[in-house]
Image (cartoon, rainbow, N blue to C red):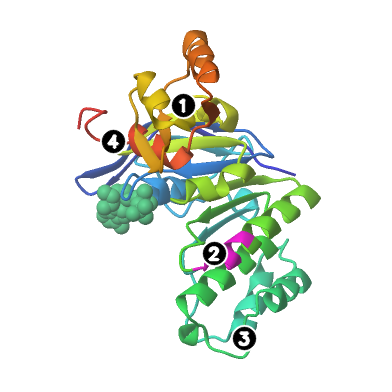
């Protein structure tokens, strides 16, 4: 059964430093969420609170409608997988997989199937794994946990592009077979956009945006066509690319009917906004008055 997540007026301080402030957030059960934010925005802190690795300084956190802090029956249904995993480096990969079975729902057979598919060397010690293979081991343990709320905190870091692609596909296959709540914290937005249902952006310890992916993509557009015609639209571009006489620009606002008509008449194609460009724009400190 999937788990919902509710945060109400949550804050987290590390000594004098406020990592999170006034967080109100609702994640519905059974959806795939992308958690985006710049370095130090508070993503790991937020996920650590939801997994009850940390206690909030103030506020309430409910998982599946119950307070998560010191609630073993709820926590046992939640998996937070952090980059590099939280492994005992002196253990072998095989022993690490076997130790997953302390979780009630851990599927050891599935873990070995994934280990084989991702070519994990079972006899090697964790300390001897490459960074990418260590990330794969973390991802394998996270998928095999078969938790009702699974949160991957930048586990893809270190994986090469084909491995990341295989990981996303496996994540989706596992999700379709057994719908549950998934949170993917990442910087590689465009890469995961197709898998996400909703996007949450954390910025400097606060929730900056929470929208479904279509609404997020509707916050802007990409226009591609003859350079002179694109320039003639007079739009404020966040990013632009030029190839010969063709120009492509990204804008961070919905296009009005008149602009759409003029663009169509000039042979300009309108496509969805590049999420990476939009994310950079939305979290630009100059825009948000830092
Ligand atoms: N253990 C800690 N002690 C003190 N400050 C911390 C600690 N962990 C995080 N912070 C601070 O809290 C803020 C949020 O950090 P956090 O790791 O949650 O961000 P993040 O969005 O996950 O960043 P990144 O993308 O770089 O991993 C940062 O200012 C960070 O320096």
Q: Earlier in the sequence, mark 3 or mark 1?
A: 3
The residue that mark 1 highlights is 220
Which residue corresponds to the image point at 48% horizontal and 12% vertical from the top-left?
256
Check if mark 2's residue and mark 1's residue have beta carbons within 8 Å. no
* Label 4 to label 1: alpha-carbon separation: 16 Å
Q: Residue at x 50, y 73 (%)?
A: 132
Alpha carbon separation for disc pair 3 and 2: 20 Å
Mark 1 lies within 8 Å of ligand 1 (Cβ measured): no
Inter-mark Cα distance, 2 to 1? 27 Å
| Quadrant (top left, top right, bottom left, bottom right) of the C terminus | top left
Q: In terms of secondary structure, where does tag 3 sit?
A: loop
Q: What residue sits right under mark 4 in the picture? A: 284
Viewer-nearest of labels 4 and 2? Answer: 2
Q: Foreground residue, 276 or 87? A: 276
Q: Main secondary structure of the magenta part?
A: helix
The earlier-in-sequence mark between 4 and 2 is 2
Q: Is residue 252 visible?
A: no
Query: Nearer the N terminus, badge 4 or badge 1?
Result: 1
Q: Nearer the viewer, mark 4 or mark 3?
A: 4
Residue tagged 2 = 161
Disc 3 versus disc 1: nearer the observer: 1
Q: Looking at the image, which is closer to me, 19 or 77? A: 19
Segment colored magenta: 159-165
Q: Earlier in the sequence, mark 3 or mark 2?
A: 3
Q: Mark on residue 121?
A: 3
How far across and down, in percent of the image, does residue 236 sit? 33, 24
Q: Residues within 10 Å of mark 1 (few under 14, many from 20)?
A: many
Helix, strand or loop under label 1: loop
Q: Position of residue 158 (x, y in %)?
A: 46, 68
Nearest the viewer among 123 and 63 is 123
In the image, residue 112 sits, relative to residue 200, either above or below, namely below
């Amino acid at each position: 059964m999937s788990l919902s997540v509710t945060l109400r007026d949550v804050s987290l301080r590390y000594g004098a430093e406020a990592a999170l402030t006034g967080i109100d957030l609702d994640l519905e059960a059974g959806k795939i969420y992308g958690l985006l934010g710049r370095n130090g925005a508070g993503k790991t802190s937020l996920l650590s609170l939801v997994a009850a690795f940390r206690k909030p300084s103030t506020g309430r956190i409910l998982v599946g409608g119950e307070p998560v802090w010191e609630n073993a029956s709820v926590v046992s249904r939640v998996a937070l997988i952090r980059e590099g995993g939280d492994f005992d480096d002196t253990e072998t990969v095989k022993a690490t997989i076997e130790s997953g079975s302390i979780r009630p729902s851990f599927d050891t057979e599935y873990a070995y199937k994934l280990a084989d598919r991702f070519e994990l060397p079972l006899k090697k010690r964790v300390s001897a794994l490459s960074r990418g293979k260590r990330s794969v081991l973390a991802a394998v343990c996270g998928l095999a946990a078969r938790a009702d709320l699974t949160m991957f905190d930048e586990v893809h870091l270190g994986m090469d592009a084909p491995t990341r692609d295989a990981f996303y596909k496996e994540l989706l296959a596992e999700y379709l077979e057994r719908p549950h709540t998934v949170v993917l914290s990442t910087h590689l937005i465009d890469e995961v956009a197709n898998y996400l249902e909703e996007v949450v952006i954390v910025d400097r310890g606060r929730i900056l945006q929470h929208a479904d992916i279509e609404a997020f993509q509707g916050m802007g557009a990409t226009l591609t066509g003859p350079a002179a015609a694109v320039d003639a639209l007079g739009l404020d571009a966040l990013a632009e690319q030029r190839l010969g006489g063709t120009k492509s620009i990204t804008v961070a606002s919905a296009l009005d009917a008149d602009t759409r008509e003029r663009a169509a008449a000039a042979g300009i194609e309108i496509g969805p906004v590049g999420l990476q460009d939009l994310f950079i724009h939305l979290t630009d400190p100059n825009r948000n008055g830092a």
